Amino acid sequence: MERVAELDAWRAVGRDLAARFAPRAAHWDRERVYCHENVAEMTEAGVMGMTLPTQYGGKGASFAAAAAVVEELGRACTLSARIAVEANMGGIAAVMAYGSEAQKRLAADLVLAGDKPAICITEPDAGSAATEMTTTARRDGGGWVLNGAKHWITGGGVSKLHLIFAKAVSETGQPLGIGGFLVVRDPDAGIEPEGFRITGRERTMGLCGMPEARLEFEDLRIPADMALEPPGGFARGFAALMSAYNFDHARDYLLTREQFGRPLAEFQGLQWMLAEMDAKLHAARLMLMDAAASRGPEGRFPDMAVAARAKLFATQAAIAVVNDALQMHGARGYGADTPLERMYRDVRMFTIGGGTAEVLRTQVAGAALGIRTPQTRDGYAPRAAE
Ligand code: FAD
């Protein structure tokens, strides 16, 4: 009961913000600018860092509550929804799970003040095969020295906290495994680490207000207390996504638009399309709640396979539903007077960023079959139980 009340209360917060964000959603897309105003309102409403524990100043809200807020925001402004995701999951969740006390406080303070942390993993030659990254962190006296390059870093240029993944090597060059390194960059506050450069920004198809940046590190010095070395390697944060982007637009349009002297809602072909959309959204919502719940009260992250399954389904459902909604609007859907063309562009990245649909299928299949599914030439490992 308490849980239902929590979800309802947070959903109302999300709905309220969404109503204010909807009229300006097209602006961020058109001008390709980050929505600082929305972030300030989300900070004020307690959405930024809502899932952080209360002892760090957060609201201690559940992932399910965050998913409800993200869903509501996503109806109006995908950009804001995405920021809300990354201010609660992914990089920040990793720091809260594996960081030292000081690192947790640093990260929590930044996020609660409105920062959307950047997680820096992908490199030009290491995408799905992230472990093939070549960025290195060499142990050097009391700290680490980072060299390498990353690309497609969401928030690069606006984010303050960066969680950078690199191959750690000892002073003598011995490989130590992949670790995370925290770097704060905040030019407005005069914090510009030497050896940390933002070298470019991608021109994206959608979510145009969010910078996707190229970063370079040249002898970037990182103090020892900014290294994050999770036990047993880093578990990627759950990239939540809600899929109720524009089902409402489609439903309302079918009820009002008339052709052949009847509302579109009376044509069975469109009714069936809407029914499929409804079923996909409902299933996606249930799977996301299932994944959020799999985190458990003591858990750090949702169960990997449950989260992979939810992301796989919800991202594909989101793209299909947006596409069908656009189709139902005819030429109006294709034009810029409805938000559908923007949403269509926005949503397309979700089967790529944060783990592609193909890689997720491999994870889900591995869990279903109970086998390990390494993708390197060495081939498949024997059954886990053997
Ligand atoms: P590749 O790995 O080259 O894959 C190309 C195609 O081959 C894909 O369809 C892929 O699914 C498929 N493929 C690859 N291996 C297999 C396999 N074994 N079996 C079947 N199919 C396979 N990265 C970050 O580190 N931080 C970020 O903040 C971030 N934000 C992003 C935001 C956006 C909008 C986008 C588009 C990407 C972002 N990324 C980010 C990068 C993202 O994580 C990578 O794009 C993704 O991991 C895929 O890597 P790649 O693009 O190099 O494609």
Image (cartoon, rainbow, N blue to C red):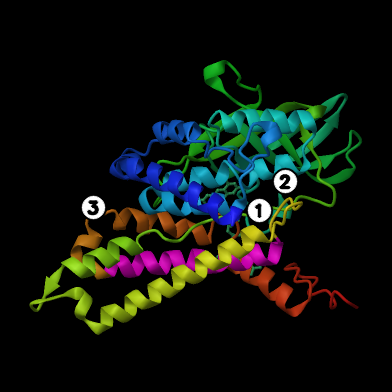
Label 1: which residue?
Answer: 126
Magenta-tinted stretch: 303-327
- The kind of residue tagged 3 is Ala
Q: Count residues near mark 3 (Cα–Cα under 10 Å), then give few for <14, some for 14-19, many for 20+.
A: few
* Distance Cα–Cα, label 3 vs label 2: 42 Å
Q: Is residue 209 something that shows in the picture?
A: yes
Can you tell which quarter of the image residue 271 is in?
bottom left
Q: Count residues near mark 2 (Cα–Cα under 10 Å), then give few for <14, some for 14-19, many for 20+.
A: some
Which sits earlier in the primary sequence, circle 3 or circle 1?
1
The residue located at (62%, 65%) in the rendering is 290
Label 3: which residue?
Answer: 336
Label 2: which residue?
Answer: 134
In which of the image's four quarters is ligand 1 placed?
A: bottom right
Which sits earlier in the primary sequence, circle 2 or circle 1?
1
Q: Count residues near mark 1 (Cα–Cα under 10 Å), then give few for <14, some for 14-19, many for 20+.
A: some
2 and 1 marks in contact (CB < 8 Å): yes
What percent of the width, then of the height, locates residue 35?
Answer: 41, 36
Q: Is residue 135 something that shows in the picture?
A: no
What percent of the width, then of the height, locates residue 195?
Answer: 66, 26
